[in-house]
Amino acid sequence: MPIAIKMPALSPTMEEGTLAKWLVKVGDKVSSGDIMAEIETDKATMEFEAVDEGIIADISVPEGTEGVKVGTVIATLAEEGEDLSKAKAPAVEEAKAASAPVAAPAPAQAPVSAPAPAKAASATVAKQSGDRVIASPLAKRIAAEKGIDLAGVKGSGPNGRIVKADVEGAKPGAAPAAAPVLAAHAPAGAQDFGIPHVEEKLSGMRKTIARRLTESKQQVPHIYLTVDIRLDALLKLRAELNSALEARGVKLSVNDMLIKALAQALLQVPSCNVQFTGDTLLKFSRADISVAVSIPGGLITPIVADAGNKTISAIASEMKDLAARAREGKLAPSEYQGGTASLSNMGMYGIKQFEAIINPPQAMIMAIGAGEKRPYVIDDSLQIATVMSATGSFDHRAIDGADGAAFMKAFKELVEKPLGLVA
């Protein structure tokens, strides 16, 4: 009996993905655990393994297809010895049934009209009651990008459905003012004013970043608290530790030490190691730090779990591995989903101070600016010190200003007296 292989949910929040690459072809035999395809989610490109064994009878979603909904039939697996041509039928019919439009009921007194000529039927079958255009999600996206009015496109798919091939060769035309798909992809007011430009399609990652950060700023009441922190003692300790660790091939960065300080501060001020859930407050007993890493096309936050109880050298080795695999798109969902707080460091770009947007459902994020030589009062005298500005963004629904201030004080003390990080 044929088995329908469906688009998997590779993370709890995944709703759709891109079928980046097939690693099998029709006729190939697969066993449980074999890698069948590479699927791009909003965060990474992941390998999709076979669960059952059999022979690939049909591939119904070609590689490179974007916006494939979770649960969509993407291929069919047949048992060994089964007729492949018959085995693929159930999956194909299931896919057709899922996409077939539901016709609106006819008015009670509507007269029965004569059937239209066969030639005209194929050109109009894509139009249902109310002139609704039936098109695949990919065809809709391509049409939106090219400014193509789908009402004038003839569909060649099942039941006259407009597919990718139909719109790729179509000429741009004015789209109906009320077309919902265009409204979703071209915000009202977007104009180029005749300025030379290039349109770049948003990746799934960029769309997710845009949606989540917009939701955060609209729904989470942010409160920002900034402190200036002397780095001289931490820089001195870092140099000494790196000298001692050189033989082991470990090199600590300032960021590694700040990850440790952030985690310890959360453990010292547990009222900030929380998450707001609406009618309850989650209070975490462990500090898992999400660290912002810039990657091509976006940003990802790999997690150092239980950072408060790890040595700085262990954090350094883990971050080196996580950052490398993040840039290659090879992180597992468990390595970037979760975390109790985030760290975003833009000091390497010379940014003096900034306010980061909270990464929901977390309740705080620490923004780190560049360390720079500044006039600073030390022991009642004006001296020159290496100082950085750190700004904590807190979800005011979960964290009061006084608790946030206590947390910033603890973080400042840990950085300025860094022996506490290795004790």
Image: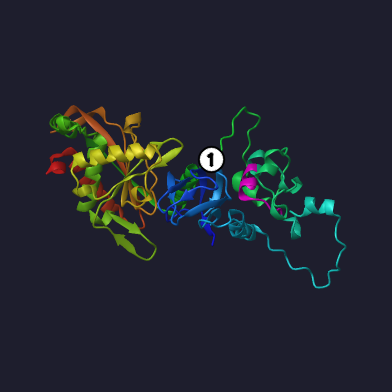
Residue 169 x, y percent position in the rendering: 70, 38
Mark 1 lies on residue: 202
- Amino acid type shown at disc 1: Leu
Q: Is residue 246 above or below residue 91?
A: above
- As helix, strand or loop, the secondary structure at mark 1 comes to loop
**Among the 4 quarters of the image, the one containing residue 317:** top left
Q: Between residues 102 and 421, which one lies in front from this camera angle?
A: 102
- Residue drawn at 71 percent across, 53 percent down: 133
Q: Most extreme residue toward the right, as rendered?
A: 114
Q: Is residue 222 visible?
A: yes
- Residue drawn at 19 percent across, 39 percent down: 313
- Image position of 378 (left or right of 8): left
Residue 13 x, y percent position in the rendering: 44, 54
Asked if residue 147 lies in the magenta stretch, the reply is no
Q: Between residues 240 and 356, which one lies in front from this camera angle?
A: 240
How many tags in the picture? 1
Asked if residue 139 lies in the magenta stretch, the reply is yes
- Residue drawn at 11 percent across, 44 percent down: 423
* Few, some or many residues within 10 Å of mark 1 (<14, 14–19, 20+): few
Q: Between residues 233 and 182, which one lies in front from this camera angle?
A: 182
Q: Most extreme residue toward the front, as rendered?
A: 81
- Image position of 355 (left or right of 26): left
Q: Is residue 242 visible?
A: no
Residue interval drawn in magenta: 133-142
Q: Between residues 363 and 294, which one lies in front from this camera angle?
A: 294
- Residue drawn at 24 percent across, 54 percent down: 286
Residue 316 x, y percent position in the rendering: 24, 38
- Image position of 212 (left or right of 364): right
| Helix, strand or loop for the magenta stretch, by majority | helix
